[in-house]
Amino acid sequence: MMNNIESKLYVAEKPRPLRREVEKSIDFPVEALGKTLSSATKALNSIIQAPMSLCGQSILAVATLSVQAYADVIIPIGSGHKKPLSCFFVSIAESGERKSGCDSEASKAIKEHEIELNKLYKSDFDNWNIKQSAWDSERKRILNSNKPIIEKESSLSELGSEPSMPLKPLIICPEPTYQGLCIQFREGMPSMGIFSAEGGQFIGGHGMTAENKIATATGLSSLWDGEDIKRVRVIDGTSIISGKRLSMHLMVQPKLSIKLFSDSDLKDQGLLSRVLVTYPESTIGTRMFKEFDEADSETLNRFTKHILSTLSLPLPIKENTQNELCPRELHLSEGAKNLWKDYLNYSELGSSKDGKLCPIKGLALKMPEHACRIAGVMSLIENIQAINISEQNMKNAIELTKFYESEALRLFNAGYIDPNILLAERLLNWLHNNWNKEIVSIPDIYQRGLNSISDAKTARKIVSILVEHGYMHLAEDLTEIESIKRREIFRIIPKEL
């Protein structure tokens, strides 16, 4: 047991929090969204009184989902790399920040379009059911007839292929598993979104459990990249699902965001570098009553109608397929290309060992691609038939991505997206609740502790974090634990301190 002198010493050296307060955010560059999206964002902010970046993120996510099917951007590297316009967004906000209000208002057009699709689906399904029954009956009659095989083959050829089922009328879903998403893409709409004002449903759902999260993250990353979905299963056999587009916007509370952004598996796999995040300061306590402004409502109605008209356009479907997209190419103008090259160089230099972007280099090195995607979205919102990205749209997109860059750095500096901090928290919890001793050694930690700390190097690195923050101290006066000699023994600060 600790003596009184030691106890007083530990009280005097009260541990510091492993995570620091998040620094103040820079202002969200709302004007960089362009006329249509910035007007809608400011109107949403006026009506809901949620943080501006939360409103802007909601509007931009809806805009992305509405246009992602129609074009792919050509990134000017080498002979050109074709990439989707799809974007993944995460908005961090406390309960009471009106996340649901933002999502509900911004997504009106999507929900209205889904309602119309569902009506058509019911009618189309009834017609398909009739045709399918007739086709099944005729096929059975042909096969059961006494005609020679060659005549049966001819009759089956004349009968033609089985009638295609109508596409499932789902555009957005809050918490799909990757397997469920693949099935939906095979049987439903080729352009979809994972949208949820309660993103914890997805983060804590079946698709992100320990045994499923790598497959989910890999699948989402592949969809973001625009790659085909290739699956080989015992029951379903081999399938290749091509021409699909997926956007995402999850609104999550701070504690759940830590679980997401501190996950080393998700970071190593690359999903987190494909996510644009914002964590605005709270507006709770500042949202005093204000009179309803009809002009704001009209602005949002115009945005809803604009998005609805875009969603109602015929999708560019590949010939001889039912739901495989064939987006056209969207190129950077010369002015846009010059701006983009400078931004690419900035991101590369900033990601060097001593660069300011090094802590978030995985994301930083993808920021030029993020900029191309956002610039493409803004171009198609202006003109759905656009074939070029203007210099102004690229300038605006770079301003927006630099905002997201600053948000990621804020979270890193506070320890939100540092997997080592998460591991240190887990180790501290294990020491307080499972170890039940006042001293511990490095071998005790990696041999008897968490599965994720399985070697001396990792254990020493995580222990150094706890020592630095005052949760453990090197016990220089001790040389053994339970009669076993140890090189390094640490005293653990009691939990109540």
Image (cartoon, grey):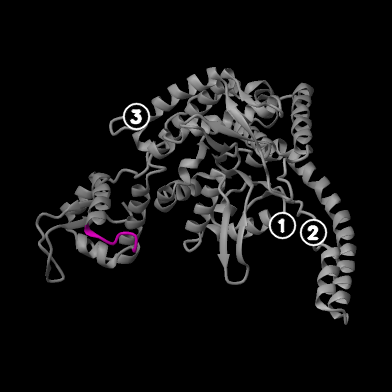
Residue occupying image coordinates x 57% and y 67%: 233
- Looking at the magenta stretch, what is its main secondary structure? loop
Tell me, yes or no, whether the two marked residues, 2 and 1, touch with CB atoms within 8 Å: yes
Q: Secondary structure at mark 1?
A: helix
| Res. 43 visible in picture | no
Q: Quadrant of the N terminus?
A: bottom left
Of mark 1 and mark 3, the one earlier in the sequence is 1
Tell me, yes or no, whether the two marked residues, 2 and 3, touch with CB atoms within 8 Å: no
Q: What amino acid is found at the position of numbered circle 3 in the picture?
A: Lys
Q: Nearer the viewer, residue 147 or 66?
A: 147
Camera-near label (1 vs 3) is 1
Marker disc for residue 356: 3
- Residue 373 appears in which quarter of the rendering? top right
Q: CA distance from mark 1 to mark 3?
A: 46 Å
Q: What amino acid is found at the position of numbered circle 2 in the picture?
A: Met
Give the magenta part as a residue range: 451-456
Marker disc for residue 432: none
Mark 1 surroundings: few (<14), some (14-19) or many (≥20) residues within 10 A: some
The answer to whether 436 appears left or right of 217 in the picture is: left
Residue occupying image coordinates x 79% and y 33%: 309
- Location of mark 2 (residue): 165
Q: CA distance from mark 2 to mark 1?
A: 8 Å
Marker disc for residue 187: 1
Q: Nearer the viewer, residue 54 or 285?
A: 54
- Residue 211 is situated, as x and y percent measured from the top left of the image, at 48, 64
- Residue 193 is situated, as x and y percent measured from the top left of the image, at 65, 45
